Image (spheres, coloured by chain):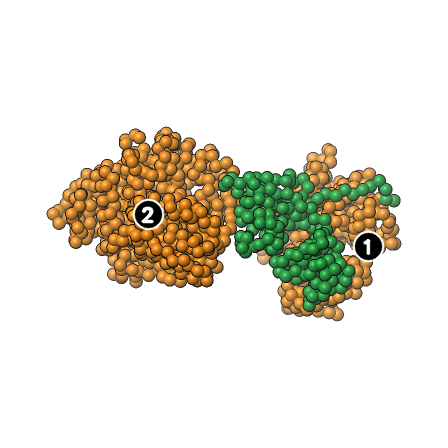
Amino acid sequence: MADPSVTLTVTGGADGLGLPLRHGDCRLTAQPVATASLIAPYPGRVAACSAALAALGLAFPAPGQGLSAQGARIVWAGREQAFLFDAAPPDGLAEHASLTDQADGWARFLLQGTGAEAVLARLVPLDLRAGSFPQGRVVRSLLGHMPLLLIRAASDAFEITTYRSMAGSAVHELGRAMRATAARG
Amino acid sequence: MSGGWRIPGRGAEIDRARPLRFRFDGRDMEGFAGDTLASALMAAGVRVVGRSFKYHRPRGVMTAGAEEPNALVEVIEGPQQTPNVRATVQELYGGLQARSQNRWPGLSFDALAVNDFLHPFLGAGFYYKTFMWPRQFWERVYEPLIRRAAGLGSLSGRADEGEYEKAYAFCDLLVIGAGPAGLMAALRAGRAGADVILAEADTQLGGRLLADLPEIGGQGARDWLAGVRAELAALPNVRVMTRTTVTGAHDGGTYGALERVGLHLADPGDLPRECFWRIVAKRAVMATGALERPIAHPGNDRPGVMLAGAIPAYVNRWGVAPGRRVVIFGNNDSALSAARALTAAGIEVAACVDPRPEAAVLEEFPVYRAAQVVGTRGRMGLHTVQVRHAGGLSEVQADVLGLSGGWNPTLHLACHMNGRPQWDDRIAGFVPREGMVRGLTAAGAAAGRFSTSQCLDDGARAAGEALAAMDMAAPEVTPPAAEDAPYGIAPFWAVDARGRAWLDFANDVTTKDVAQAALEGFASVEHMKRYTTQGMAPDQGKNSNTAALAVLADATGQSIPETGTTTFRPPFVPVSIAALGAGARGKGFAPERRLTSDAQTRAMGAPMIEAGLWYRPSYFPRAGETTWRESCDREVTMVRGAVGVCDVSTLGKIDVQGPDAGRYLDFLYTGRMSSLKPGRIRYGLMLREDGHVMDDGTCARLGEGHFLVTTTTAAAGQVMRHMDFVQQGFCADWALRFASVTEHWAQFALAGPKARDLLNTLLDQPVSAESLPFMACQPVSMAGVRGRLFRISFSGALGYEVAVPARYGAALFARLVEGAEALGGGAYGMEALNVMRIEKGFITHAEIDGRVTAFDLGMQRMVSAAKDCIGKPASERPGLMEDGRGQLVGLRPVDPSDAIDAGAPLYTAEAPARAASWQGHVTSAGYSPTLQGWLALGFLAGGRARHGEVVRIHDALRGRKLMARVCDPVFLDPEGRAMRG
């Protein structure tokens, strides 16, 4: 029989990685993912998904778009996919889209500082200048060789989400780029 | 300074208040901050800086830039050394240690200079003609010998431990080169608000202005530059990148660029040595200037012979005189300008030799018109120049000879996409054509427009055109007034006189070599290049290209345009592999994927092995165990007798949902999945489109329109891609979606007769054999955490796999290991897992290696006859289901003490171990403590009909020979009683 004294403690995706990390004016912190559902509308059901998401004050996002309302957030995450963060999927959504719990599959970090764009220029092969990648914009790309969901959180801050299993490599690579960027002053 | 080579009042770029000590060939010397190694060596009176590639002739500094062919040195940093560093590019820092190259025992006496006396035998094609036979001598004898005698710098033999980086940059306009044209282009585009990157290879902006110091807009060049520099720095949309050489023009407006970041510092701290940039630009202006070319005359390679334009650069930039008496030999007006500038700087010009009969002679120095330099003297440094003129032959005492055969526009980048430049008689050189690289425009000297005024105008024009092409307003600019002297030149390439006249200094190629190539039929420019090696040294022909063409044209009786150029390819300057591969050294090569159980696993002392990118435990050693086999045998016995725990989270988990999910999976798998009942699991095979097995795994139906596909660890990505392809390509309108949930779930296998006992210590609602039968699944709760429970087994023992969200993975693993140990079991690793699946004849990618069919595996019955699936038609092609094919079998040694190696080939018992009698191969092998002997799986021709036969295993690679008996691939519990119990 189950031992009632047993509890299962929680280990975060970025635990034990030495965060926060600081080099120059750049700071890398862990941003735990509380809830995350991947929403993938069935063919032709984007509008129906938006209607269901209206209960949260949200809609299904266009490519590259992120929306937030009432503490919940939805961000585009690839072809006909979006992540819903910080809220449970509203009723009726499952009829129009596949829903998978992904909260534990990802490690999320915030990179903040005036050098953040320069740090990412060493790891992400995309044009992240503010004009091309303004605040709130979302993109799927690579962080070095790692899968990446990148959101511009502020003019000097990026939200970096990658596979939980690769979090150690991600922090190592980011730390390396932060150190080299900081050394340039 | 020693010898007094510094010129008072000159040298704006050095800081005489900051002397720096450095060491060259073991000698301590002193230079100043701002010096290059070349200028510092020159100031220290060093004339010979290296030995030539083939003939080991003494060589001195020839240029003041990246095109330097002679002054290549090794820079030493602790145990590391960097070969072929151009002394003209390397900036001086305190404590710099450099060493000359390609000499033994020393620079002043080099034993291999004997080659120079052998030169009549060592001309073009010598190696090809001489070292043809005996054939096997090439690799073992000749090549090592030649490599020792001919060569450049040497490597330390150690891995490069330096830090490098790679980075991306994006802009509207990339301006390549910051001479007058580039600066005007950057200014105009910057003022217009465009995002501009101005890349300059030198340490500072200015280009030739820094050497020639012309007046611009009524100001001195330095004052004008200071103003421009300040304006560019104040424009937030302009990014100035000095020490950055654009190395290549590539597709889609992408340019490669190499930045020297920390190589000029005594203590670079955390700065990388170099950064390799990929710059993506909507438009680019190539304002790369021009490279001066020498003239081929006998003895033109002595230390002290240099490019005429380099002399004012050393005088004006670093305040150093390359010599005391200078002869200038040039066929164009820039040579005369150089001579005047030197005179103004107080350096004696002993003669200006001009082959043009109409050259002006009213100068402050003697001018020989219609004259030529026909020879030089001075083995370790020039002391006499022989001049042939109308009055006869004169000997002029001089320690420097400045050559100028004209200027070649630096158009290499424009040629990187296979465009060919065109010949321009006006400058006797090649100029770029429009449109050679889409979006790139040449401006200034790079376009063959040489006066300062033309460069300024042209830079502004090019920026205006680029802005217009980007639909951006271009504010009018009025370039400042500057010198606009016409460029007079009469083509003159090689002096007709006895003696070796060098074209390619870096590879020791003379005019005779080129003529010899033509004579032997290598008359096309590409053949001549390869036969003589002209243009194949680190300078890639920057100093020799056009003159070599001209000499070839002369030898073949063609014009230069008819002869054409060789192909300029990236990179424009040498790029270290370390910079291209920055960050990829060691574990940087690929990310590591770590399990939630990783920390505890390592703490338990388990050696980790890589599976894909994952790190998994091989085995968990316990006290007293000295070999992996002891641990592995114990772990297998533990599972067979009690219970084992293994992290299986690495297996791919793909969640498939939607009303059409079942129909889709039927199409994907060889078997039918739509008929699965919710809560049940089925084993499945997926085929590639070509009919071969791609992967195997289980498919669980979690709900009506909800399935969970598992894949092998190695093929997870491939299966995901395949599923995407099938869905998008064949059934895009079906109502289903899938997503990888591999990372979300931590999943652990519990295997062994006590697996259920262990499980029930955790489950909030216990399970029984009946409540959850074999191949069933259900949601569960453990300590309030919701998870999933699957009754499946990869070990053949009573088995479960329990999954929880990854945040609970570490805690659950710890709890399971603790529980298993209390029951006489424990954690097991990949070795034990492998042995147990071999005991059961379960396949992995050792068996499904991409070449086998379901038929070969004995799984043809899993390919449903009642429906279609991906790969089924192709699997029915002739030859893919033949009895003679390699079929999966089991193998056991006839002598129980024999071991079997995976990979070993199989032969019939009587036949010799030859390719002709090859019968198959062993795919997996392991020692089974359960069955007390070695077991193996393999593919044997027609194997299913050969059970009981004895075959020969002859592993020549590892020197193991044995006889083995063929059997069914399932060695243990063929009815599956244990896992169903």
**Lower position in the chain sequence, tag 1 or tag 2:** 2
The N terminus of chain B appears in which quarter of the rendering? top left
Where does label 1 land, which residue? Answer: B778
Give the chain letter for orange.
B
Q: Residue at x 15, y 43 (%)?
A: B394
Q: Is residue A37 left or right of residue B377?
A: right
Point 62% across, 60% down: residue: A63
Which residue: 73% across, 36% down?
A: B622
Identify the element where label 1 is drawn. Answer: strand
Q: CA distance from mark 1 to mark 2?
A: 78 Å
x, y percent for residue B752:
80, 46
Task: Give, as a three-letter code, the residue at label 2.
Answer: Arg
Compared with B656, A109 (above or below) is above
Q: Position of residue B422 (x, y in %)?
A: 33, 61
- Count the marks: 2
Q: In green, which chain? A: A
Question: Can residue B698 be seen?
Answer: no
- Decide if residue B873 is in sight here: yes
Image mark 1: chain: B
Q: Classify residue B932 by image quadrant.
A: top right
Residue found 35% across the figure and 36% down from its top:
B14
Question: What's the residue type where badge 1 is placed?
Answer: Gln
Q: Is residue B774 above or below residue B153?
A: below
SS assignment at label 2: loop
- Name the residue tied to disc 2: B208
Residue B634 in picture, x, y percent from top left: 75, 40
Say which of B549 and B671 sits in front.
B549
Q: Position of residue A165 (x, y in %)?
A: 67, 47
Q: Chain of mark 2?
A: B
On the rendered structure, is B407 left or right of A59? left
